[in-house]
Amino acid sequence: MSKIYQKNILSPKNSVKRKFGGFTLIELLVVVLIIGILAAIALPQYEKAVAKSRFAEMILVSKSIEEAEKLYFMENGTYTTDFSALSIQLPPGGTQTVSGVSYADGTYYGIAGPSGGWRIASSGNDIPAIYQRLLQSSSFDQCIAKSEIGEYLCKDLGGSDSNVSIVAGNKVYRIPK
């Protein structure tokens, strides 16, 4: 072997590198930066997916309540605001009052009418929109967006902005039935 080759192998610098081979601070910072960027992109999409799932469940329950209201209307000639008069089984765990059912997670289903129009209102603490099934002769439902994600949910249902604001910052969308 040549002396130059032996010198490079046995130098303290190379032996330390071989013993403690690892990542430099710059390499670690780049990896942390990439993970941060990916998390910043993924988190809003995850929040939208969770909200969409909860909103879809809320709409299904609202449709079931509407069907029970239609049955009640066929039997009695009017709608009711009393949940106990409806032949419906709601998801378990709710506390029922005369005109609504509320759950521990903040989800609420209510029946209202006739002064404001017969409707089923569904909302939730962690759902950024309120969904209203309008009964009688309405050809649309309403979606009231409480945030940007709520607007996304309302538009995802095919909603069009009605240019009405019930409470400052909330937009009302018309959803075709």
Image: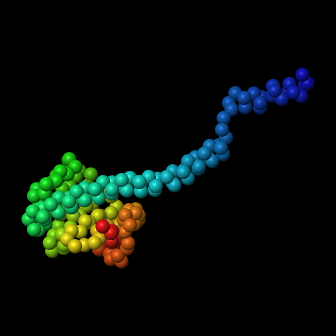
Q: Is the image coloured rainbow, by chain, by secondary structure, or in one colour?
A: rainbow
Residue extending furthest right? 2
Counting from the top left corner in percent of width and height, residue 75 is at 9, 62
Q: Is residue 13 above or below residue 112?
A: above
Residue extending furthest top? 1
Whether residue 151 is visible here, answered yes or no, is no
Q: Is residue 90 above or below residue 166?
A: above
Whether residue 129 is visible here, answered yes or no, is yes
Residue 19 sits in which quadrant?
Answer: top right
Image quadrant containing the C terminus: bottom left
Counting from the top left corner in percent of width and height, residue 119 is at 21, 67
Residue 114 sits in which quadrant?
Answer: bottom left
Image quadrant containing the N terminus: top right
**Is 44 on the left or on the right of 172, as rendered?**
right
Q: Is residue 53 above or below residue 7?
A: below
User: Looking at the image, which residue is at 33% across and 77% down?
Assistant: 164
User: Looking at the image, which residue is at 12% across and 61% down?
Assistant: 72
User: Looking at the image, which residue is at 54% across and 51% down?
Assistant: 38
Q: Which of 131 and 31 is in front in this view?
A: 131
Residue extending furthest left? 76
Q: Nearer the viewer, residue 11 or 53?
A: 53
Residue 144 sits in which quadrant?
Answer: bottom left
Q: Nearer the viewer, residue 79 or 110?
A: 79
Counting from the top left corner in percent of width and height, residue 31 is at 60, 45
**Is 165 on the left or on the right of 8, as rendered?**
left
User: Looking at the image, which residue is at 33% across and 68% down?
Assistant: 175
Q: Nearer the viewer, residue 79 or 152?
A: 79
